[in-house]
Each structure stands twice: as C-alpha cells, then as structure tokens.
Amino acid sequence: MSQENPSLAIIRVRNNESYGLSHARASGWRAATADVVAILDAHIEVHELWAEPLLTQIKADRTVVTSPVFDKVNFDDLKVIPYQPASHAFDWALWCMYESFSDEYYKLKDGSLPGKSPSVMGILVAERKYLGEIGLLDEGMKVYGGENVELGIRVWTCGGSIEVVPCSKIAHIERAHKPYMPDLSKAMKRNALRVAEVWMDEYKHNVNLAWNLPHEVLQM
C-alpha cells in the first residue's frame, strides 16, 4: 500500500530472467486492473495534469492509443529542453523518428489539438481491455528496439489510431548508453525483420533492403 495514499495498491512484478522490454511491459499489463493503463519508462518525470488530456481522448474513443509530448532532460546536467509536438514516425529500418503532423492538422491552426501519429516512442496510455483485444505487444521481440513501431502498426491495422496530445507533457532523460547491451544493432535488426515478416506483406522487402538483407531467408 502507498503511504501517501492508503487506498492505492502497488503491485510489483519481478521477472527472474531478462526477457526484453515488450515482455516486461506485458507483465505489467497483466497485473493491472484499472480501466486505463499507462506504460512509462522509469527515467521520466511527468508534468502537472499530464494524464487528464490523454484520458479525455480515450474516453471519447476507446480505440485511441495516446502519447504525451516528450521534453528532453540532459543526462549530465538535468537541464530540460522543451520539444514541440510532433508525430512519431519511423523509417524503413523501423527506427522511430519525429515528423510533422499532416497538412490538415496545421490548417486547423490550433496547437492544442491532438495529432494523428503512425507510431509511439514507447510511452503510451490506452484502455486496458482494448490493448488486450488487439493482442497487446509482441512478446517475441528481444531486448529493445522496434517494439514501439510494432505496436503502432498493430493499432492502426486493427482499426485503432494513435494520437500525440500536446496538452500532456513529460520529461524524458536520454541515457548516454544502454547499460544492458553495448551494441543494440543486432537486437534492433532482428526485431525489425520480425515486424516486417509479420505485418508488412509486400513492403517487407523495403525493410530487408534497409538492413542490407535483400536475399536473406529470415528465421524468426
């Protein structure tokens, strides 16, 4: 129980082995009981009233998966660098990057409106049952990298949508290095090829090319 709020129950899920980010997040989802779940990184701080704008969108449409806007926190001096709202896109290597919202969004001239996004950077809030209905996350993804793009493709393919909500903000500390693996390229490559094989049909060839594997027979 939480000392600050005696009515708040805290459930800690501990895995005996390192299964990867997707499996860890799925473990948390299975332990959750609320109507809405928030999947967060440990190395963030939330701004005041960050949750309410996300919950508003989900209340209006249960198939919307929402993401706040990230501010960057320098790992060395903890200085906060504000970021502008943007969609979470990805390249053919299935690595996430920021892109502008659609032209239709900017024609509305209201920067407080949520913008549609192809993917999420990893932090999201969604209706718990809806995530289960679409299969949650691919727990076959290893370590880290590509699981957020996989979720984005899964949500849109299964009839949902993803929105970045400018009125919700968090601050994210970007690590200087990933302590669990000095070189993430092997896991990222493997995960990207898995996503392409499962979801991308005739477009998977483009992912193979991005990873310099035009003729390789994939073993997932």
Image: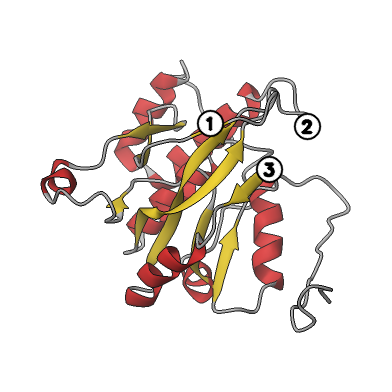
Q: Which residue is mark 2?
A: 180
User: Which residue is more in the foreground, 128 or 38?
Assistant: 38
CA–CA distance in space, label 1 to label 3: 34 Å
Please name the colour scheme applied to the rendered image: secondary structure
Q: Where is 4 relative to 89, above or below?
A: below
Callout in the foreground (3, 2): 3
What residue sits 46% from the left and 72% below the top?
A: 130
Numbered disc 2: secondary structure: loop
Instruction: Please provide percent x and percent y for residue 203.
Output: 32, 35
Q: Which residue is identified by label 3?
A: 43
Mark 1 or mark 3, earlier in chain: 3
Q: Residues within 10 Å of mark 3 (few under 14, many from 20)?
A: few
Q: Nearer the viewer, residue 7 or 121?
A: 7
Q: Earlier in the sequence, mark 3 or mark 2?
A: 3
Give the Cα distance between marks 3 and 2.
Answer: 15 Å
Residue 9 seen by the camera: yes
The secondary structure type at the circle numbered 3 is loop
Check disc 1 and report the residue beneath it: 218
Place of residue 184 in the rendered image (x, y in percent of width and height, measured from the top left): 65, 25
Q: Residues within 10 Å of mark 1 (few under 14, many from 20)?
A: few
At x 15%, y 48%, the residue is 109
Type of residue at label 1? Leu
What secondary structure is found at the residue carrying circle 1? loop
